Image (cartoon, grey):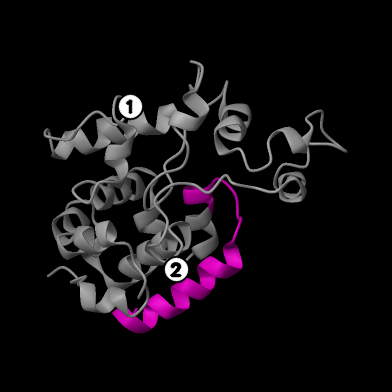
Amino acid sequence: MSIQVNWSQITSLAPKALPAYQQAFVNAQVALDRHGVSVNPLRVAHFMAQVLHESGALTVQFENLNYSAARLVEVWPSRFKPKGALDPAQYAMNPQALANQVYGGRMNNTAPGDGYKYRGRGLLQLTGKDSYAEATSIVRKSNPACPDFVADPDQVVNSLWCVEVAAAEWEAKGCNPLADQDNVQAVTLKINGGTIGLSERAAWLARCKTVWHA
């Protein structure tokens, strides 16, 4: 029997959730079952902890790239002066220019504007054209009606697809067995590519464990 994830549980953790996310989680059980997230309480707790962190407690759909000059230097010290070559003043409070600069030319973002077009979106902040293509391929294996997220990246935050994308990405990255081991650092490495926000993710995990009794 799968672990049920319902909106009354989530709202206790994310009382300011966006309407699209509210609607998505009302109908999330099928996707969570399909990708093995709901097999046990520990998997649900780890999945929701990562989702709540990445989405700002379900209040963020798109990556916030509206940085001050000082913050740019903190986030990308190797790119911006004084250590890097770029002048932070030219990219401060300019999300489109910033995304095209820091994401362009990698993750298969090859065309002009791809960095911004394929910036972080959704419950696990899918980033880069490669990731959008991979998400399309993974989700279509179990749901042929899945749209092409490369052609229409905003579908990643659509209430019909956001949980499916996050759960499919979670499974494809091998997070389920790591959650079974209760290894928040290993899960974070898979989701984030590093350990940014590890303490906050661990705090979310502790809260989620009380909800799903993991």
Query: SS of the residue at dot 1?
Result: loop
Q: Which class describes the residues within 10 Å of circle 2: few (<14), some (14-19), or many (20+)?
A: some
Question: Disc 1 marks which residue?
Answer: 150
Residue appearing at x 57%, y 24% in the figure? 104
Q: Nearer the viewer, residue 153 or 88?
A: 88
Residue appearing at x 35%, y 50% in the figure? 170
Q: Position of residue 195 (x, y in %)?
A: 60, 55
Q: Is residue 60 left or right of residue 90?
A: left
Residue appearing at x 47%, y 24% in the figure? 114
Query: SS of the residue at dot 2?
Result: loop
Question: Disc 2 marks which residue?
Answer: 182
Q: Quadrant of residue 205?
A: bottom left
Q: Nearer the viewer, residue 101 or 135?
A: 101
Q: Which class describes the residues within 10 Å of circle 1: few (<14), some (14-19), or many (20+)?
A: many
The segment highlighted magenta reads 189-214
Q: Earlier in the sequence, mark 2 or mark 1?
A: 1
Residue type pointed to by label 1? Val
Q: Position of residue 208 (x, y in %)?
A: 38, 76
Position of 106 relative to 65 (above/below): above
Image depth: mark 2 or mark 1 in front: 1
Position of 102 relative to 72 (above/below): above
Position of 131 relative to 33 (above/below): above
Q: Nearer the viewer, residue 20 or 206?
A: 20
Residue appearing at x 74%, y 45% in the figure? 69
